[in-house]
């Protein structure tokens, strides 16, 4: 799933009023649950294209969250956002380092992905972003 969806949902979890431990826990768990939904991801085999898409995606997610929360941005929202993308950050670095350490985690993280065609996968993420955004502002 794109980082924008993870960031918006993580921010909503952070804004929920839960404790820091709960925000950390629910943000990571929600990441994996969201990855089981049908979604589109950029192709990791095309490194330059992947970095461009991933960078734009991250920037859009950050701008969207910051735009929605405005002056209400607080450490809990930031923690929710950070831990909502942590599983992908870990996967990215383990793949970049090409190490056998964490190989079981990488395989499991790949296995739970429910990648869909381009438009269907984008539509499901837009719905997640909309729902997360609504939860964030109410």
Image (tube, helix red, strand yellow):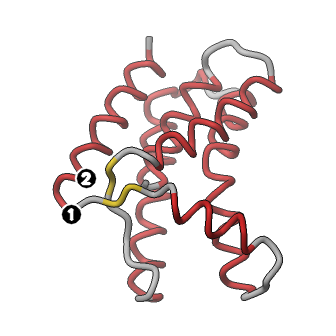
User: In the picture, which quadrant includes the N terminus?
Assistant: bottom left
62 left or right, relative to 106: left
Residue wearing tag 1 = 118
Give residue 26's position: percent from left, percent from top: 66, 30
Rendered position, 19 above or below 93:
above
Label 1 packing within 10 angstroms: few (<14), some (14-19), many (20+): few
Looking at the image, which residue is at 43% across and 44% down? 5
Residue 78, given in percent of the width and then of the height, sits at 68, 37
Q: Residue at x 21, y 63 (%)?
A: 118
Is 135 displayed left or right of 77 in the figure? left
Indicate whether 77 appears above or below 55: above
In the picture of the structure, the residue carrying the numbered disc 2 is 122
73 and 13: which is toward the camera: 13
Which numbered dot is residue 129?
Answer: none
Q: Quadrant of residue 79?
A: top right
Where residue 35 sits: x, y (%)?
47, 49
Residue positioned 42% across, 41% down in the render:
64
Q: Assign a secondary structure to mark 2.
A: helix
Category of crowding for the residue at label 2, using alpha-carbon neighbours closer than 10 angstroms: few (below 14), some (14–19), many (at least 20)? some
Residue 131: percent from the left, percent from the top? 35, 26
Evaluate if marks 1 and 2 touch, with contact meaning CB atoms under 8 Å apart. Answer: yes
User: Does dot 1 land on a helix, a strand or a loop?
Assistant: helix
């Amino acid at each position: 799933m794109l980082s924008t969806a993870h960031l918006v949902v993580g921010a909503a979890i952070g804004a929920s009023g839960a404790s820091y431990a709960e925000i950390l826990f629910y943000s990571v768990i929600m990441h994996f649950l969201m990855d089981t939904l049908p979604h589109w991801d950029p192709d990791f085999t095309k490194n330059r294209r992947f970095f461009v898409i991933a960078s734009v995606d991250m920037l859009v997610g950050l701008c969207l969250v910051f735009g929605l929360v405005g002056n209400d941005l607080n450490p809990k929202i930031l923690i929710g956002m950070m831990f909502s993308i942590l599983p992908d950050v870990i996967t990215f670095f383990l793949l970049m380092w090409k190490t056998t350490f964490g190989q079981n985690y990488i395989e499991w993280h790949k296995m739970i992905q429910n990648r869909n065609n381009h438009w269907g996968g984008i539509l499901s993420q837009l719905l997640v972003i909309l729902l997360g955004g609504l939860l964030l502002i109410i």
